Image: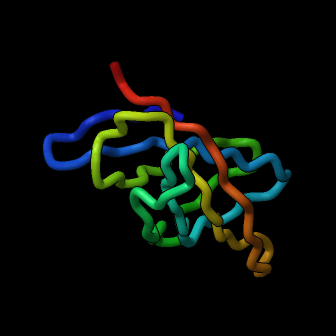
């Protein structure tokens, strides 16, 4: 996971890997960025438009962040995907360090 700055917003790149032997389609990512005191900094949902991830492959998902982090933050969320016509949810969690 890497954070970077866009001209108009901050973006966190999240790598999603499909460990299964069959492809899956990502449908959405619900997320929440929290400060070290657990206060919500930013939250939302990213529609992934049925983005396909081949078996064993990885893709990168862009998650918008309202402000540049000036302290360590935590990203927590739920990734929803479809595989073999079954909807599955996966927990997402990562620590975000400020860029110095």
Q: Is residue 86 left or right of residue 35?
A: right
Picture layout, residue 51 above or below residue 2: below
Q: Is residue 73 left or right of residue 81?
A: left
Picture layout, residue 96 above or below residue 67: above
Residue that appears at 58% across and 38% down: 95
Q: Is residue 82 left or right of residue 44?
A: right
The image quadrant where one finds the N terminus is: top right
Residue 88 image position (x, y, % from top left): 76, 72
Quarter of the rendering containing residue 38: bottom right
Residue that appears at 62% across and 47% down: 16
Residue 26 image position (x, y, % from top left): 60, 65
Quarter of the rendering containing residue 50: bottom right
Residue 96 image position (x, y, % from top left): 51, 36
Quarter of the rendering containing residue 92: bottom right
The image quadrant where one finds the C terminus is: top left
Tell me how many marks there are: 0
Q: Residue furthest front?
A: 37
Q: Which colour scheme is used?
A: rainbow
Q: Is residue 48 left or right of residue 81?
A: left
Q: Residue furthest left?
A: 7
Residue that appears at 70% across and 73% down: 82
Residue 52 image position (x, y, % from top left): 59, 60
Residue that appears at 42% across and 34% down: 71
Q: Residue furthest right?
A: 21
Picture layout, residue 14 above or below residue 30: above
Picture layout, residue 86 above or below residue 13: below
């Amino acid at each position: 996971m890497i954070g970077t700055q866009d001209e108009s917003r901050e973006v966190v790149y999240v790598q999603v890997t499909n460990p299964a032997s069959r492809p899956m389609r990502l449908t959405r990512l619900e997320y929440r960025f929290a400060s070290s005191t657990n206060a919500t900094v930013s939250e939302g949902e990213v529609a992934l438009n049925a983005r396909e991830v081949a078996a064993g492959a990885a893709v990168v998902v862009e998650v918008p962040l309202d402000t540049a982090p000036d302290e360590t933050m935590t990203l927590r969320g739920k990734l929803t995907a479809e595989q073999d016509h079954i909807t599955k949810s996966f927990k997402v969690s990562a620590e975000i360090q400020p860029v110095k």
